[in-house]
Image (cartoon, rainbow, N blue to C red):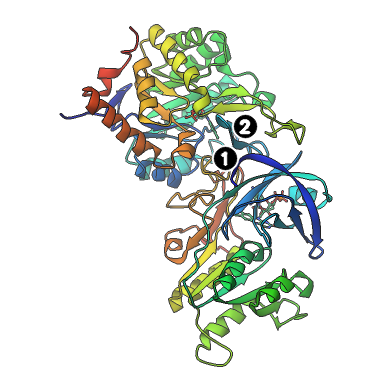
Amino acid sequence: MSINLSVNLAGIKLKNPTILASGIMGISAASLKFCEENGAGAVTLKSIGHNERIGHNNPTVYVWENGIHNAVGLPNPGIDGSIDKMSEMLNVLSIPLIGSMFADTIDNFVMVAKKMAALNPAIIELNLSCPNTADDLGRMYASDVKMTHDVVSAVKKIVGNIPLFAKLTADVTDIVEIGKSAEAAGADGLTAINTVSGINIDIYQKRPILKNKVGGLSGPAIRPIGVRAVWNLYQAVKIPIIGTGGINTGEDAIEYIMAGASAVGIGSGVWYRGIDVFKKVTDEMKVFMEKNNYHSIEDMKGIAHV
Amino acid sequence: MFNEKPVALLIKEIIIENERVKTFVIDGEMDFKPGQFTMCWIPGFDEKPFGLVSRKKSEFMITVAAVGTSTKALHMMEVSDMLGFRGPFGSAFILPVSGSIALIAGGYGMASLFNLAKEAREKGIDVHVFLGARNKDELLYLDWMKELGAVLHLATDDGSEGYKGFNVQVFEDWVKNEGGPRGGIFTKVYTVGPEIMEMKIASICWEKSIPFEVSLERYMKCGFGICGQCCVDPVGWRMCVEGPVINGEKLKQITEFSKYHRTASGKIEKYPWNKDK
Ligand SMILES: Cc1cc2nc3c(=O)[nH]c(=O)nc-3n(C[C@H](O)[C@H](O)[C@H](O)COP(=O)(O)OP(=O)(O)OC[C@H]3O[C@@H](n4cnc5c(N)ncnc54)[C@H](O)[C@@H]3O)c2cc1C
Ligand SMILES: Cc1cc2nc3c(=O)[nH]c(=O)nc-3n(C[C@H](O)[C@H](O)[C@H](O)COP(=O)(O)O)c2cc1C
Ligand code: FES
């Protein structure tokens, strides 16, 4: 029996559904190529903003009992300092590159998107949901229906044929309203979820571990939250969803696909399984599909909605 | 013991090595291999990578040069203050089965090499240490190295101890005098220090076909391979996982070695001596 692991994500063909999530590796062409060599179907670059940021001081990332916790604070060289880097990425990669971006104002979103679109990445992903930068970037766009609509429609106007994805957070009263608003504004897809906001305190040092105090939880702890988000969105929107959050194994990926995801994002799994997590997850999916008579990812998509 | 979350540990003793360098003896175990590092959390400031040193099982040490905000803050701390530690992280040095090895250290580099020297001596391997510093006071761990029975080759910029000049020169002369009374070839060479020094050692070893390992330091944030901050070009290896210890063959593939590194924002910064485009 032949098994087809390739997927069509908003018109972009992926050889397998595993995608490196934004903010993990993703800092240079070399780091993304390393993920490609380890089996990723597509890679996302670390979110790029309107200007250079050095991010928060350490501790910015550490592993806790049930996941990873981070408040890196979106360090990046800014869009102008990233053009050469992105061109190099597009040159050396043979898999699709997803350009992740953020900004403070809608004008800056448009400015960054214009420059990024000129390079023609496979997909542009709007990071509307970083939980660690409220102090200087303000509220997350994805926490508000209108803000989401305004930013997606403004950017959609200028990215031409490049599929536009909106990355959402589960830290809202109703993620479905936000997802529907992104779709109505012209988004070609959704990524769900970003990290979930939390605090861990070191009781001996009597202070939060992260320098930023609050940070985003990822890894196994948030998987059911992500699956629930994808589940609800799948019932409400027609555009494809990249299911992300706590995917470490092929079984985890299939859980997201059965909830309705078209492809899966993997971040923390790079720590839990190693850099070859993409290959491992893909192999494990294949084994599951062989045993259970599925021929394609499409065969499994959304089938848990009984 | 491996710490994923920072573990709060007490400073047991502080050894003042010289004006710029202090060694902090930590009350706790860290089960590391020579060449590995820890992420040390200085509460309220930052968390930074330091080479791991240990002379007995119940305690470990870090030797810190005060160079910037967080290392200066660390130098202000006192016995019984608490620091957080994660790790150990990264790749380790590999010893030959027998023979003789050379360790070439500059700056605080001896910290990452001390336990390699200790392990080598325990295995009966001859250890030659080519240690360089600005002056006599800045030569690290001299007594400890003597205790281990290492052969010391010292060099200082001002000539206050040993050869006046660079330890690289002393090493080069020694290797070139192979067969002579003040010379010899080594089974393997290890170097930790300023990248320009590491580059010179690498060139000598490549030329002479001596197997060697370097510790390649890059800006680190997570320390466990997910943030991508420490990836090197063009191979993308993470210096906190695939490194910091890299052997001479693999080093050939890291074209940014001795040319540039990345700052906290991920921007490329050329080294001052690099005159390329
Ligand atoms: C694997 C490894 C082992 C190290 N071992 C030792 C050691 O045993 N003893 C010692 O004194 N120092 C060691 N260092 C260097 C030490 O981490 C830096 O000196 C320290 O982080 C400087 O912090 P700062 O705030 O005082 O200075 P800053 O003013 O922030 O920086 C001074 C210099 O230190 C470097 N640096 C700053 N932050 C980092 C970081 N997060 N990661 C890597 N480099 C950084 C910068 O490139 C800069 O050149 C090691 C570094 C690495 C990567
Ligand atoms: C260290 C770290 C940095 C991250 N940086 C970004 C980022 O820059 N942009 C973004 O959209 N998401 C970022 N994320 C969120 C991830 O892309 C992903 O949505 C989240 O971690 C959940 O997936 P996981 O459990 O597989 O890690 C980051 C996550 C981590 C752990
Ligand atoms: S410091 Fe984060 S990957 Fe190495």
Circle 1 Cα neighbour tier, 10 Å, few/some/many (<14 / 14–19 / ≥20): many
- The residue at the point 57 percent across, 16 percent down is A171
Q: Is residue A64 left or right of residue A292?
A: right
Counting residues from the N terminus, which is met first, the one under dot 1 or under dot 2? 2
- Asked if residue A58 can be seen in this view, the reply is no
In the rendered view, tell whether residue A125 sits above or below residue B274.
Answer: above
Q: Observer-nearest residue: A277 or A184?
A: A277
Q: Chain of mark 1?
A: A
Image quadrant in which you'd find residue B161: bottom right
Amino acid carrying mark 1 in the image: Pro
x and y percentages locating residue B105 in the rendered image: 63, 69
- The residue at the point 47 percent across, 71 percent down is B96
Q: Which residue is mark 1?
A: A77
Identify the residue at the far left of this view: A1
x and y percentages locating residue A22 in the rendered image: 48, 32
x and y percentages locating residue A92 in the rendered image: 36, 45
x and y percentages locating residue A220 in the rendered image: 49, 27
For label 2, the SS is: loop
Which numbered mark, 1 or 2, is in the foreground of this view?
2
For label 1, the SS is: loop
In the rendered view, tell whether residue A25 sits above or below residue B62.
Answer: above
Q: CA distance from mark 1 to mark 2?
A: 17 Å
Image quadrant in which you'd find residue B164: bottom right
Q: Observer-nearest residue: B270 or B156?
A: B156
In the rendered view, tell whether residue B174 sits above or below residue B134.
Answer: below
Q: Chain of mark 2?
A: A
Q: Which residue is mark 2?
A: A71
Identify the residue at the far bottom of this view: B181
Marks 1 and 2 in Cβ contact (< 8 Å): no
In the rendered view, tell whether residue A205 sits above or below residue B34.
Answer: above
